Amino acid sequence: MDTPPWTTGIVDGKNRRLMSQQSAAFLDLAGQALWRARMKTLRTRAASGRAGRHLITRHAIEFMLDRLAGGAAPEPHEQAIAALAQDAVRLARRLPTPARSRLREMVREGLDGEATLVPLFHLLRTAALQRARGFDVHFAGLAGERHDLLITRDGMEAEIACDVVSAEEGRDVHRGAWVRLVDQIDPDLQTWLAAHPGRYLLKLTLPQGLRVADASLPALHARIRDMLASQRRSDHDEAAVLRLDPLMLAASQAGEAGLLRSVREAFGDQAHLALTNAGGSLLVMAARAGREDEISAAIHRRLAAVAPARLSGTRPGIMAILVEDTDAREWRGLRERLELEGEARQFLTRQEARAVVAVSCCSRLELFAATGAAPEGELRFRNPNHPAAKAAALAPSILSSI
């Protein structure tokens, strides 16, 4: 496929119109009626609160494509998504009818309920990476195979299975549940602050975690509200430890951004933070689980479960993982601490990895070609025990990036 003209320089008026046309053509894959209904639902749900902002982040691709199809000026990170949307449109035009129907189904699946378009765009981006490395790429999954892509170079073939793993699988306190709790408790906190002027820190330790579907979310809301109403400064049981303290003077004198940075430094990268203002008073909530997050371990478990089912074992296999529901700070930490490398290399020693010649990991930073993305567009870990590990034809896609 040709390189979209807007990815090679400044987006001028002509390229902007082309980008708008290609984005609109992608919307046609879903069907205009379905797309309009989806965007109406998302806009309604995103109208207010932290949960609304969280939803906008999760469904960023839909909002980007809708903006671009309407002729809006593209932001830099939107150009990568527009290029992948163009890939999808071109792919649909050349596919036979059954495969084209499956592609349309994938688009529609990404627009249903809590699903997103990230899995489809991860597939499209993985294919684009392989083409850029000199491979011929066949969308085998759209033809009914278990693996998603079949790549070929210099007579060598490899299968690629694309998968998305939510970082929430490695957290006891889920971000979706946290933002929902904060939205629910915020009016109570504002009322309390109006009656108790000052600056406070409410610390929550949650040994049993916090999840959207759990009864613990409304129960925790009630406990915080009751603790404040009864003038208590602490409350604890096996499910939660709550403590309310005045903010340290050095932190309370800082602006909001500096204040949250200070609290982040005190509680660590894994803490969930929220700030409530009421006049000149404020309260910062800081929540942590009872144990460290295990995002990389969750990826390891997912690899072990998925690889045997997705790869045939008759060709070298690559597991291409996108780590979803993580932010730039967390993704950088996972890379710098070599946690992803450690768990990936442990997986590659297991029996479930016998068909896997390499594992690759990326996040939305790489998907959006954003600042802070991995230098090669992904992290890669080669399996030195696989028979094809030293195959020169596969080297661009299997050589370890670390």
Image (cartoon, grey):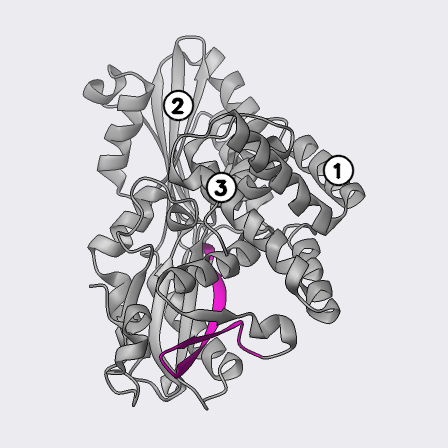
Q: Position of residue 248 (x, y in %)?
A: 23, 23
- Is 161 inside the magenta-drawn segment? yes
Instruction: Establish if 317 lies above or below 127.
Output: below
Residue type of the residue flagged with mark 1: Arg
Image quarter of residue 401: bottom left
Which element carries disc 1, helix, strand or loop? helix
Q: Which mark is residue 36?
A: 1
Marks 2 and 1, the one that precedes in the sequence:
1
Residue type of the residue flagged with mark 2: Leu
Looking at the rendered image, the disc whose residue lies closer to the viewer, 2 or 1, is: 1
Examine the rendering and report whether any part of residue 226 can be seen.
Answer: no
Q: Position of residue 155 (x, y in %)?
A: 38, 83
Image quarter of residue 329: top left
Q: Which residue is mark 3?
A: 178
For label 1, the crowd category at 10 Å Cα-Cα, with few meaning under 14, some 14 to 19 and many 20 or more, is some
Q: Cα distance, mark 3 to mark 1?
A: 29 Å
Image quarter of residue 101: bottom right
Of the 4 image quadrants, the one containing the C terminus is: bottom left
Q: Position of residue 82 (x, y in %)?
A: 53, 42
Marks 2 and 3, the one that precedes in the sequence:
3
Marks 3 and 1, the one that precedes in the sequence:
1
**What's drawn in magenta, residue-wise?**
146-168
Left/right placement of residue 302 relative to residue 380 reads: right
Q: Nearer the viewer, residue 353 or 194?
A: 353
Examine the rendering and report whether any part of residue 84 can be seen.
Answer: yes
Residue type of the residue flagged with mark 3: Trp
Q: Which residue is mark 2?
A: 283
